[in-house]
Amino acid sequence: MKLKNALVIGASGGIGAELIKQLYASSEFEHVHGVSRQSLLSEQEGIAYHQVDSSDEKQIMQVCEQLKQHGNFSLVVCCVGALHGSQNEVDLHPEKRLEDISAEQLLSYFKTNSIAPMLWLKHLLPLVKADDKAQIVLLTARVASIADNRLGGWYGYRASKAALNMLIKTAQVEYQRRAKNVELISYHPGTVDTELSKPFQGNVAQDKLFTSEFTVRKLLSHLTSLDLEAAPHYIDWDNKTIAW
């Protein structure tokens, strides 16, 4: 069997670290590469880490150039995103009302949740363009659905993730012309017990708070059933389609 290459962007987070673990354990990949803003060391042959700030396009371009030496990549998962905490020198807090909105916070949300993943999509093209099918997964959220927005609030997070969805749909159009083998997936992992969701877990039903192991296992399982001709896909942890 021909072994493949995989890339996880945002490898130091809960979902990213679990992806590295499960992809390596699957024995389907010759090399599993992880990208993180933090410096990470691999203790296992076949796993390599690269320190990259995803807000810096030059760094993204440089690491993609370096990765070309490993050949084509059949799977890329981008876990970059922010809901709260310090990003771009701005303290993010999901807005509950109009008065909570600020230009600085909105800009920070868009830089992290929309622009950074799109810069990766820009520079990944030479790594995934091949005869064999390749998949690029970008973690979004159900709240990014414009059609499904009934609760309101969380202006910056919703809008930046919705913008990412539009960028994914638009990029798929161009990928279909330039790399017909590539399938883009917008994936809602559910509420996962990670640092991103910790302040907001109080209102989550116990059976809807997932471990990273669970959501990664579900994602990798769903990837085997997706139809390239129907891409891009916007699905949740249960492989159910979400309205764009």
Image (cartoon, rainbow, N blue to C red):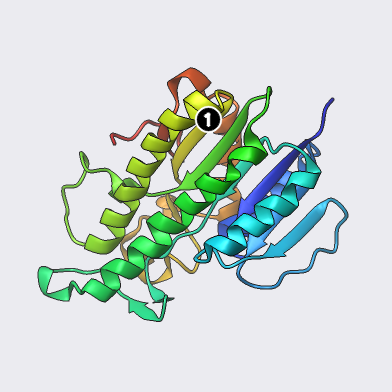
- List x then y, in percent, for residue 234: 39, 35
Left/right placement of residue 209 relative to residue 19 reads left
Left/right placement of residue 11 relative to residue 180 reads right
Q: Name the residue: 11% across, 69% down.
A: 98
Q: Is residue 200 above or below residue 142?
A: below
Q: In this orientation, which residue lies closer to the viewer: 240 or 65? A: 65
Q: Is residue 58 above or below residue 176?
A: below
Amino acid type, label 1: Glu
Q: Is residue 220 above or below residue 43?
A: above
Q: Is residue 21 visible?
A: no
Left/right placement of residue 187 relative to residue 69 reads left
- List x then y, in percent, for residue 12: 62, 65
Q: Tell me the quarter of the image containing the C terminus.
A: top left
Q: Name the residue: 31% across, 49% down.
A: 163
Q: Name the residue: 35% across, 69% down.
A: 108
Q: Name the residue: 73% across, 50% down.
A: 67
Q: In this orientation, which residue lies closer to the viewer: 145 or 22? A: 145
Q: Tell me the quarter of the image containing the N terminus.
A: top right
- List x then y, in percent, for residue 173: 41, 29
Residue 35: image quadrant is: bottom right
Q: Is residue 130 visible?
A: yes
Q: Which residue is mark 1?
A: 183
Label 1 neighbour load within 10 Å: few <14, some 14-19, many 20+: many
